[in-house]
Every structure is written in C-alpha cells, then in structure tokens.
Image (cartoon, rainbow, N blue to C red):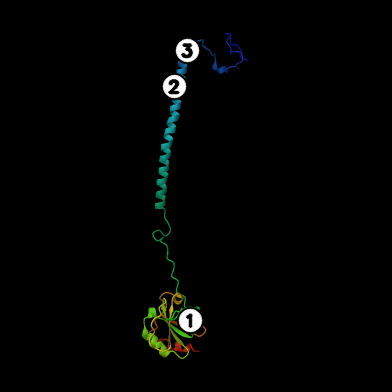
Amino acid sequence: MGKPDAEGHGPPDGLPDLPPEWGRVVVPDDASALASEAAAVRRELRRAAGRHTGHRALTLPLLVLLVAMLTTLAGLVAVTWPRVGRGTDRPTPAPSTPPVTLTGQPLPALDLVDAGQAPVPLRGLLPAMIILVDDCGCPDVVTEAVAAAPAGVTVVTVSEGRAVATAPPTRGVRALADPAGGLRSFLGPGAANALLVDRTGVVTRVLPDPGSVDAYQDDLIALTR
C-alpha cells in the first residue's frame, strides 16, 4: 500500500502507489479547480482527432490519383512497347489446298434418274464417258463423243436436278439427271465437264473442257481394254 510523504500525504487506502516521478499529487477539495486543466486536455484531444480526420480525408483522393496514374502508364507501355512483326501481324491466310486429282480414283456408286425418274446405277453403265451438260452446254461434244466411242462404251449425259436434258438425236446416248448432286460433289465445283471411267469403275481421265475429240480419242478407245 502507499506510504505517506513527508507531510503525511499518501494515496488513499486500497489504491496502488503512484510512480515517484509524478512527484507530489494534490487532489483539490473543489473539482472546479481542475476546469482549466480539463479544458486544455479537451483541446488537445480535438486537435489530435482533427489531425486523424484530415489524414483519412486525404487518403481517398490520393488513392484515386495513384490508380489513374498507373492506368495511364500501363496504356502508354502497351502502345509503345515494341512488338515482333509490328504492322505485319495480320492473320496469315491458310494456303489453298490444291485439288486432289481424280484420275485413278474409283467412281462412287451413284444412283441417277432417267426421264421417267426411275433410278439408274451409274456404275452399271461402265465403261463410259460421262458429260455434265449443264456446265458444258455443248451438243457438238456429245455428238462427236458418240461417233468416236468404240462399241461397249456408253456416252452418258448428266444434268443437275431432276429434269433430264434433251439428248441430241444421236444413237448411243444415255441421258440422266442427278437430283442429289452426287456426281458434282465428287468432281468438285467447276472441276470438270467430262470424265472417262473404265469398266472397273476407275476414273482414267478428267476433262475440264472436252474440246475436240482428237484430244481424248485414244483414252476413249482404251476404255474397252
């Protein structure tokens, strides 16, 4: 417990001793005597609170300014950073795939239709010279092919859709239609107007433009071998 000082003053009973560096502590009988000290303490507390609030008020604008600066710098870096192939970084188009040659390929088992819309297996007419008359539009080619074809070789004219093209008045022409477009799909768009197929169903020659019969007559005769 506390001990009294030289004048007999000491801490009340039940309270711990005060630090000696505080010196003599005098508690006045009238609390109003401490009013000036209390006012000074309140002023100091208000100043401390004002400083704390000011720091908090400045923190948010500073953060916004910092974020704006970082965003601007990031944009400048993205624009000015050197890139490999800058100015030529457009997608490179895929190289075009050359068409697969049809020579030596087997003819698909296609069913075409005749003028009465009856199905006709194309492979049942082999060996044959097959002419797509929609793209060709060349009755003279058909006439010459029939005249040059050896016995046993069928000249087949094929039109797209269900309507069978009118065959020229030449013996030995089989006029058919390809409603499903299977033959054109096999040849590819614009790939050929005529083809020669041997008795085993193998394409021996593709003719983008049949032209004169002299250009393919030997191949036409070879279909019978």
- Locate residue 82 relative to residue 24 in the image: left or right: left
Q: Quadrant of the N terminus?
A: top right
- Amino acid at pointer 2: Arg
- From this view, report whether residue 150 is shown above or below residue 118: below
Mark 2 → mark 3, Cα distance in angstroms: 17 Å
Q: Which residue is mark 3?
A: 32
Q: Give how far across and how far down residue 59 sits, in percent.
A: 43, 35
Q: Earlier in the sequence, mark 1 or mark 2?
A: 2
Query: Quarter-wise, where is residue 70 in the image?
Result: top left
Identify the residue at the far front of this view. Answer: 116
- Position of residue 43 measured from the top left corner of the image (x, y, whole percent): 44, 21
Q: Nearer the viewer, mark 2 or mark 3?
A: 3
Q: The disc labelled 3 sits on which kind of residue?
A: Ser
At 44% from the left and 33% from the top, the residue drawn is 56
Q: Which mark is residue 43?
A: 2
Which of the 4 image quarters holds residue 150?
bottom left
The answer to whether mark 2 and mark 3 are in CB contact below 8 A is no
Mark 1 is on which residue type? Leu
Classify 162 as above or below 11.
below
The crowd level at tag 3 (other Cα within 10 Å; few <14, some 14-19, many 20+) is: few
Q: Which mark is residue 122?
A: 1
Q: Most extreme residue toward the top, as rendered?
A: 7
Q: Earlier in the sequence, mark 1 or mark 3?
A: 3
Dot 1 and dot 2 residues touching (CB under 8 Å): no
Whole-number angstrom distance, CA of label 1 to CA of label 3? 124 Å
Q: Nearer the viewer, residue 87 or 178?
A: 178
Task: Locate residue 198, reporting x and y percent.
Answer: 49, 85
Which is nearer the eye, 66 or 110?
Answer: 110
Label 3: element kind: helix
Report the mark closest to the observer, 1 or 2: 1
Q: Which residue is located at x 48 percent, y 81 percent?
A: 122
